[in-house]
Amino acid sequence: MNMMKPKLNQVPFVSVENMMRLALDVGVEQCMVELASHIEEDFRRWPLFDKRPRVASHSTDGVIELMPTSDGTDYGFKYVNGHPKNMKEGLQTVTAFGLLASVDTGYPVLLTEMTILTALRTAATSAMATKYLARENPKTLCLIGNGAQAEFQALALKAVNGITKVNLYDIDRTASEKCLRNLADSGLELAICSTAEGAIEGADVVTTCTADKNYATMLTDNMIGAGLHINAIGGDCPGKTELHRDVLLRSEIFVEYPPQTRIEGEIQQLDADYPVRELWQVITGEDTGRTSAGAVTLFDGVGFAIEDFSALRWLRTKVGERPGFSQALDMIADPDDPRDLFGMVQREAGRMAMAGI
C-alpha cells in the first residue's frame, strides 16, 4: 500500500522581525527566564553533547565562527561574526544565524536569525551563572560596557536573580545614556557613573561586556571587594581580555568548556595548566561552587555551542506554540522518487514552459 510521506521540505524560518515580535509577545524578561531554564537543563546533560572549540576564521578586521553541537537527537549550529570596526560604519559588530536539524534524518527543522536570540541567550547564561556563583540575594549590578548587550544583561539579572539596581559605566557616555533611556521603564534603579571604580562600589555582581578586540584592563585587583561575583563575557577571541591578570589569580574561576576558554577567555592570560572549574559541574552538584561568602567568583564566559543549542530548542517550541511567528521556507528538494532528483528538475522545466515562464 502506498502511503503519503510527510512534506519535510517546508522548514520554519524565524526572521529578525518575527524574533522581535515573538520576544515582545512572550515578554523579554520571560524569554530570558525560560532560556536560562533551558540552558540549565542542557548543562545538566553536558556529557551527552558533542563538544569542540568553535571553528574560527580570523582576519585583521574580525572573526567569523561556526559553533556546532549535538545531543544525539538534534544537531545545531550557529554562524556568528565579531567585527568591532563595524560600529564606526553604522553596522552591528556581531550578527548571527542558526539551524537545528534532526539527527535521525539530517533534515533541518528550524532556521533562524540569531543576532537577537544570541543576545537573549548570552544574558540568560550570565543570569544562570550568577544564580549558582553569586552570594545569596544580590541586589546591585555593575555593568561595564553599555553597548548592544547591556540592556539584555540588566533585564536577565533582574528577572532571574532579583537585581534591583544597576550602575552603568562606559568609556563612551552616550552608550550609558542610551542604556538609561532603554531601561527607563524597567523598574530598575539606574545610575550612570563617571568611572569604573564608582560603578563597582557597592555592587554584588559585575558584568563586563566591552567590544574592542584587544587586551584591556576594565577591572584591576584593587577594585574587587570580598564576595563579589564577576561575569566576564566580553572576551570571545584570542587577544581580547577585560580583566587584569591579578583579578584572575585572586578569583575562583568557572568556565563553560576549558579547551575553548583557554583560547578565547580571560584565562588565556594564565598558564595552560592553570586549574579552572566547569560551570556544568556546579549545576549538577559535582562541584560546590563558591567556597565562602567572602570568595571572589569569576564566570569567564565566552559563549558555547550548547547554549545556542538550548536557545534553538527553546525557539522551536515557541514557534510551534505560536503560529504566525515563523514562515515556511522551501529548502529541501523533495522528489516523488528520492533517486530521481534530475527528473524533478525536468518536470519543473515542463511546468515553466506550460506557464510561459
Image (cartoon, rainbow, N blue to C red):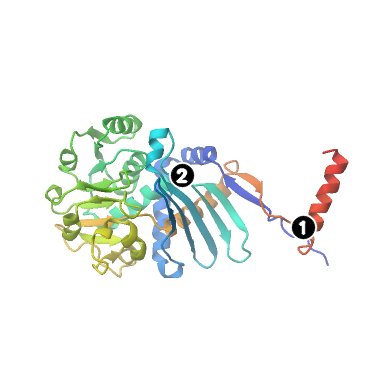
Quadrant position of the C terminus in the picture: top right
Give 133 or 102, whichever is nearer the viewer: 102
Q: Which mark is residue 304?
A: none
Q: Which tag is nearer the camera, tag 2 or tag 1?
A: 2
Horizontally, residue 20 falls left or right of residue 291, namely right
- In x, y percent, where is residue 32? 40, 47
- Residue 269's place in the image compared with 61, above or below, is below
- In x, y percent, where is residue 20? 49, 38
State which quadrant residue 91 falls in: top left
Residue at the disc numbered 2: 95
Count of numbered circles in the view: 2
Q: Are marks 2 and 1 in contact (CB under 8 Å)?
A: no
Q: Alpha-carbon neighbours of circle 2 within 10 Å: few (<14), some, or many (≥20)?
A: some
Residue at the outermost left position: 222
Quadrant position of the N terminus in the picture: bottom right
Which SS class for mark 2? Answer: loop
Residue at the outermost right position: 354
Residue at the disc numbered 1: 335
Which SS class for mark 1? Answer: loop
Q: Alpha-carbon neighbours of circle 1 within 10 Å: few (<14), some, or many (≥20)?
A: some
**Going 65% across and 46% down the picture, which residue do you hit?**
328
The three-letter code of the residue at mark 1 reads Pro
